[in-house]
Structure formats: C-alpha cells, structure tokens
Image (tube, grey):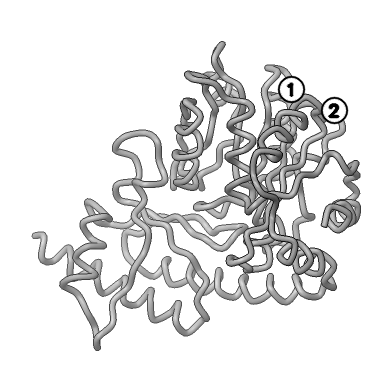
C-alpha cells in the first residue's frame, strides 16, 4: 500500500520515502492522529471558515482551539490573504489547516496562493496541514497540486489523503498521513502502535485502486463537471441566491434569500412538497466556528445525476418562493 502511494505521488513529481507515509483508518483518523501530536491544551490552529464540521470535533478532542479565518460568499470564500492570516497568529498558534479543493466551498487555490500560505507557515514556524482528499476533483484543467510540492517546506508540511473520498469507496476506511518531519513521524508511530492496524483486505483493495488507469479520473471529472455546471446554472436562476462557481471537490456553498436555513430546512422536510417530493441540504451554520455566521447559507453536494440535480434545484426554488411568501 505504501509503495502504491509513493508511486502515485511520484507521478506528480513528488518523491517520498517509505517512512514518510503512514496508512490510517480513513482521513478522519489521519486528522485526529496529527492534531493529537501537534496540539496541547489551549494551542490554536487557524482554519478558514466555512470548513468541514468535524474539524471542530477533532480539534476540541485535543484541548486545542480553532482560530477561524472568516471568508464570504461574495469573495468566493477565498482565504489566501497574508494580512488576514497573520492577524490571527500569536504565541499559541501551532498550525494552519485547510482543505484544497475545498469542502464545503469548492474553492481551488492557485499555485501562487498555495505558495503564499506555505511562506507564511514557514516564516512563523507553523505546521501546514493540507487536507487534500479531493485533489483529483478539479474542473478547469488545473495541474494536480499538493503542499508537499514545496521543497523548502519539508519540516512544516503534513498531507492528509484518503482512498475513501477519491474513489468513492466510503465503506473502505483507508487514509494516509504524509510528512517528512522526523519528530512528527515518531509521535505518530506511538499512536499507531497503540491501535490495531488498518484492515489488510482493505489495504490490498486500495493498492489496486491507486494503480487505476488515468482515464478513470478523466471520466469521473467529466461527470462531476457536468453536475457542477448543472447545479451552478440552476442556482443562478433563483432570485437572490449568492454563490461563486465551485472549482473543485463536489460541493457548492450558497447564500439563500431566507432568514435562517436551518428553520427553512425543517419547513421543507415537514410542510413543503411538490408531487410528493421535497429537497434536503446541509444548513450553513455548522460549517463555521464564528457564532452567527452561515445562518443564511447552505452546502449542496452535487452527487446526484443531472436530471435529479435539476429537479432538486427546481424544488429549492419553489420552496424559497413559498417560504418567503408565508413569512410576509
């Protein structure tokens, strides 16, 4: 399995040694192991918000604190801003962590934006954790990126990867932690030695997945791009919706013209229907650490086929219209 991971990255012109790679029970275990190694009580980690809600759980379990880097729908949720990042750094800061491509925003950082954040981490002697489980899901022809591509960041960079996400094999809990930092490797090994290893059968199957022909991802990207284009076009037709076109992953974050998307979702599920159908989304507040943020935002996952996405967005449009009429 480790040799398969090494080969995958070598194809991206990124070379790792065997000891740089640790196989984990999914990306979630990879994250919890890393955070338990680098955070103590009261330590802080900078994470752009909105972010994957389980980051809250993973950080709190360590006694650490999230310092949210707030972004906005109007800006496309971009967080590559030196002034904003450095304003959050203090003596308790231990790391910067971000998902690229982004969950829930679909943002894809440009190479110069990746370099900027890498420079900040290096200058302030911080770990830089790249949650890169959606790396293959980019739709603009961009080259596949990783924070591991920076040769001057060997002591800082930590890559989180996952078979479960990349190959839509959610039942196979296979992830990786990749770092060239020798001290961190030793601490991670202490945790690994205290738990059972990842299932051998899953590792064998995952090894085969890592060796699939590149045409597999060409087909996957084409299908998800069609779904992305469909949901984005339909959202643009709904009056009052604010969102930017997602560039990667398979999510879109949108601001809806309603006062509270959690209350709106409850209403959709209990009181609204069209020909026996309704629509469900993830309310936005759960993707933020800052109280009050995301109250009128949602995350939508475009994992349905084109026809079902179109129907879901039509239901959303009808629901918004009727909900606001009832609120008057």
Q: How many marks?
A: 2
The answer to whether mark 2 and mark 1 are in CB contact below 8 A is yes
Q: Quadrant of residue 173?
A: bottom right
Quadrant in which the C terminus is drawn: bottom left
The residue nearer to you, when weighing 220 against 65, is 65
Q: Residue furthest top?
A: 91
Query: Horizontally, is 139 left or right of 50 in the view?
Result: right
**Which residue position is annotated with label 1?**
122
**Neighbours of disc 2 within 10 Å: few (<14), some (14-19), many (20+):** few
Say which residue appears at 67% left-offset and 41% top-offset. 130
Q: Quadrant of residue 195?
A: top right
Quadrant in which the N terminus is drawn: bottom right
Query: Horizontally, is 253 left or right of 132 in the view?
Result: left
Label 1 sits on a secondary structure element that is helix
Label whose residue precedes the other's in the sequence (2 or 1): 1
- In x, y percent, where is residue 224? 61, 71
The numbered mark at residue 217 is none
Say which residue appears at 88% left-offset and 44% top-offset. 18
Label 2 sits on a secondary structure element that is helix
**Which residue position is annotated with label 2?**
152
The residue nearer to you, when weighing 81 against 252, is 252
Query: Horizontally, is 265 left or right of 123 in the view?
Result: left
Vertical placement of residue 303 versus 196, above or below: below
Vertical placement of residue 100 versus 152, above or below: below
Say which residue appears at 80% left-offset and 29% top-offset. 181
Vertical placement of residue 223 versus 104, above or below: below
Gap in Å between the C-alphas at discs 2 and 1? Answer: 8 Å
Q: Quadrant of residue 320?
A: bottom left
């Amino acid at each position: 399995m480790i040799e398969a991971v090494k080969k995958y990255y070598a194809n991206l012109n990124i070379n790792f040694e065997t000891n740089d790679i640790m196989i984990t029970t999914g990306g979630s275990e990879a994250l919890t192991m890393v955070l338990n190694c680098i955070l103590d009580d009261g330590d802080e980690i900078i994470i752009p918000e909105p972010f994957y809600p389980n980051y809250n759980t993973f950080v709190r379990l360590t006694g650490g604190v999230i310092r949210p880097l707030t972004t906005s729908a109007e800006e496309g949720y971009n967080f590559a801003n030196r002034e904003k990042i450095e304003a959050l750094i203090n003596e308790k800061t231990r790391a910067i962590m971000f998902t690229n491509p982004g969950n829930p925003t679909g943002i894809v950082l440009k190479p110069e934006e990746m370099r900027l954040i890498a420079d900040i981490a290096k200058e302030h002697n911080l770990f830089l954790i790249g949650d890169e489980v959606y790396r293959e899901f980019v739709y603009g022809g961009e080259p596949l990126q990783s924070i591991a591509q920076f040769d001057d960041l060997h002591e800082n960079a930590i890559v989180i990867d996952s078979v479960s996400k990349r190959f839509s094999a959610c039942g196979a809990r296979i992830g990786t932690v990749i770092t060239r930092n020798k001290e961190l490797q030793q601490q991670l090994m202490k945790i690994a030695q205290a738990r059972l290893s990842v299932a051998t059968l899953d590792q064998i199957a995952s090894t085969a997945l890592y060796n699939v022909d590149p045409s597999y991802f060409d087909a996957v990207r084409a299908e998800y791009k069609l779904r992305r284009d469909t949901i984005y076009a339909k959202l643009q037709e709904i009056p009052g919706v604010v969102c930017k076109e997602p560039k990667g992953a398979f999510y879109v974050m949108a601001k809806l013209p309603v006062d509270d998307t959690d209350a709106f979702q409850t209403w959709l599920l209990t009181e609204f229907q069209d020909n026996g159908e309704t629509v469900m989304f993830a309310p936005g507040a759960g993707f933020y650490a800052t109280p009050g943020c995301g109250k009128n935002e949602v995350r939508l996952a475009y994992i349905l086929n084109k026809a079902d996405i179109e129907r879901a967005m039509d239901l959303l449009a009808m629901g918004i219209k009727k909900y606001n009429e009832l609120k008057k």
